[in-house]
Image (spheres, grey):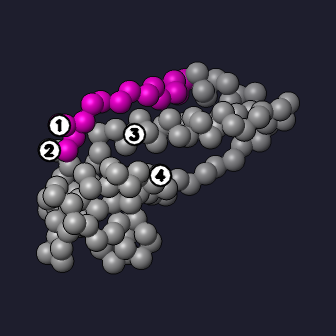
Amino acid sequence: MLKELLDNDIICKSESEYASPIRSEGLRVDFRRLNQQMRKEIFPSPNIEEELQRAKSFKYFSVLDLNSGYYQIPIEESSRKYTAFITTEGLYGFKRMPFGLKNAPAVFQRLIVKIKDSVKPNEMTGNYCL
């Protein structure tokens, strides 16, 4: 798993003074201490019922698979030190937004809405994203 994240440029070696532990099996970083220091960012999710009601009039639909969607969002270089985690192979940090940060869902939702709003709907297509 570590090699795959390195190969995909999601993580890199780190010299951070911070280090979150890994939880149980796999590469699940325990960001609880970091999350306690973060101010909660709020961004509303769309109302599913309203969105489904709007979608009734749509003629065509597209489906996007946002596999590992958080990993598509870069982390500012100055913030990467806070995402450092310790393994038996050394200290690493995230270059892309990891799962487990308390603001990750709000950041991701804001980006999805921004992308959705940049697409102009017309009479044949709606602008629908859940």
**Identity, as a three-letter code, of the amino acid under mark 3:** Pro
Between residue 126 and residue 59, name the one nearer to us: 126
Name the residue at 66% across, 33% down. 117
Kindly indicate whether the residue at mark 2 contacts the one at mark 1 (C-beta within 8 angstroms): yes
Q: Main secondary structure of the magenta part?
A: loop
Q: Is residue 81 depicted above or below 91 in this figure?
A: above
Mark 1 / mark 4, whichever is N-terminal: 1
**CA–CA distance between discs 1 and 2?**
5 Å
Between residue 50 and residue 20, name the one nearer to us: 20
Residue 103 falls in image quadrant: top left
**CA–CA distance between discs 4 and 3?**
12 Å
Name the residue at 57% across, 35% down. 113
All told, the count of numbered labels is 4
Q: Which residue is mark 2?
A: 33
Q: Is residue 36 magenta?
A: yes
Mark 1 / mark 3, whichever is N-terminal: 1
Element under disc 2: helix
Q: Which residue is mark 1?
A: 36
Q: Is residue 70 depicted above or below 127 in this figure?
A: below
Mark 4 / mark 3, whichever is N-terminal: 4
